[in-house]
Image (cartoon, rainbow, N blue to C red):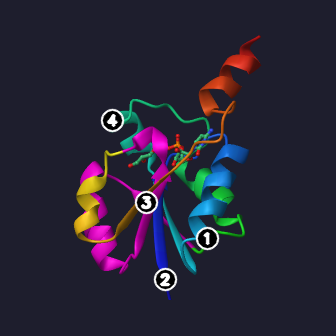
Amino acid sequence: MKRVITYGTFDLLHYGHVNLLRRAKEYGDYLIVAISTDEFNWNMKHKKCYFSYEQRKQLVESIRYVDLVIPEESWEQKISDVKEFRIDTFVIGNDWEGKFDFLKEYCDVVYLPRTPEISTTQIKQELKK
Ligand code: C2G
């Protein structure tokens, strides 16, 4: 069984996120999604989420490509996650190109093109008009 992992906030879930998860699943049979906790988002990513971790977890778990959701609580957990879950491939959008190459020692690392014209920031700005 080929195991894939990806990380993200996934707030205001949109088709760009789903496109990423669909493509990530194509690299294996089992996809784990590490969702940033509210604390991690606020303290480390300086992001204020609209939906709580539990709400974002519920939404992402409902996506057919996703097999397991775990919390992302720190930048440093990726190596231990890859080891603990016996990950074959790490996948993330290419806005992170090169940032996680250190994982190549433990698994394959894939940066996928982002879906253009959609982002949580854009949605929030549009709603303010
Ligand atoms: N994404 C995408 N296309 C978009 C928007 C997002 O492919 N139009 C991808 C991102 O590249 C990422 C995933 O969807 O792989 C989740 O995006 P975010 O929720 O913005 O996650 P991010 O804040 O980048 O968190 O440790 C890694 C971080 O937790 C990643």
- The mark nearer the N terminus, 3 or 2, is 2
In the depicted view, which residue is nearer to us: 47 or 39?
Answer: 47
Does the beta carbon at disc 3 come under 8 Å from ligand 1? no
Tell me, yes or no, if residue 14 can be seen here.
no
Instruction: Pick the quarter of the image with the C terminus.
Output: top right
Label 4: state its secondary structure: helix
Amino acid type at circle 1 is Glu
Residue at image x 47%, y 44%?
Answer: 94
Vertical order, 42 against 16 (above or below): above
Residue at image mark 4: 43
Residue at image mark 1: 26
- The mark nearer the N terminus, 4 or 3, is 4
Instruction: Report the span colored magenta.
Output: 68-97
Residue at image mark 2: 2
User: Where residue 83 sits in the image (x, y, percent)?
Assistant: 28, 76
Amino acid type at circle 2 is Lys
